[in-house]
Image (tube, rainbow, N blue to C red):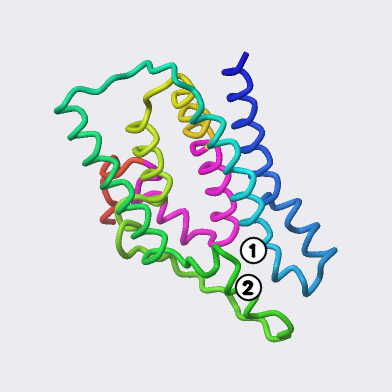
Amino acid sequence: MKYLLVSLLWIGYCVLHSFLISIRFTNLMDRLLKKYYAFYRLFYVLVSVFTLIPIIKYTALDNNVIIVYGQYLNILRYILMSGSLLMFFWAFFIDHDSLHFFGVRQMLTFGKTKETKPSNEIKRSGFLGIVRHPMYFAVTIYLLCRIHTMADLIMSLVLIVYIVIGTLLEEKKLVLEFGETYIKYQKEVPMLIPFTKAKNTN
């Protein structure tokens, strides 16, 4: 029963997370909040963090160990985990706009009537030239390497499925936003697994 609850908690978190950032809901919030929509992203981040903490704590209570790593596998596992964390934070703070993610950039525009026209260029520096979603790839590697208990396995499977589905949905948003520029990017750079697609030289 406890594993069913772990599954439901993580699935529920993923559904809530997706719903709060969906195009339909954010458009509704934009219409209702008007200029105060500049604070919505911060609200979204805070809700995501504070609902995640108790689920992580509950998952960590499981002591049913199903995988025990040997010495050499442990070394490899820690190398992969360290590399994935480095990749995640590099992509987050260097390749992406972390201020926009936390809602800081949106709050800086509060009360301003002048709209900035979004750039139609796709950033390809750093890891973005290797894989279109480096943070999702890094999280997937990290999740696979930290499995010890049955609860860990359930959490990782749910989150990896969510990452794949969420990435596909995000791809649709990006095509709508950037059009042919992003479609060309899709043809040249793999979505989640680096080095799985040859670059188009035509």
The numbered mark at residue 173 is none
Q: Label 1: state its secondary structure.
A: helix
Q: Is residue 190 above or below residue 96?
A: above
Give, as a three-letter code, the residue at label 1: Leu
In the displayed structure, does residue 121 sit left or right of residue 109? left
Q: What residue lies at 61% left-to-right and 18% top-to-bottom?
A: 4
Per the image, the residue denoted by label 1 is: 42
| Residue 157 position in % (x across, y down) | 47, 27
Label 1 Cα neighbours within 10 Å, binned few <14 / some 14-19 / many ≥20 = some
Q: Residue furthest left?
A: 72
- Above or below, comparing residue 98 to residue 199 in the picture: below
Q: Are marks 1 and 2 in contact (CB under 8 Å)?
A: yes
Taking the magenta stretch, the answer to whether it contains residue 184 is yes
Query: Residue 151 appears at what percent x and percent y?
Result: 49, 23
**Residue situated in front as seen by the camera: 114 or 55:** 55
Q: Residue furthest right?
A: 32
**Considering depth in this image, is 70 or 156 the residue closer to the camera?**
70
Residue 63 position in % (x across, y down): 44, 20
Mark 2 is on which residue type?
Gln
Residue 111: x %, y % from top left: 74, 83
Check the image and report above or below for 125 versus 153: below
Quadrant of the image containing the C terminus: bottom left
Q: Which residues are magenta?
A: 163-192
Residue carrying label 2:
106
Q: Look at discs 1 and 2 and give the one toward the viewer.
A: 1
Residue 95 among those drawn in magenta: no
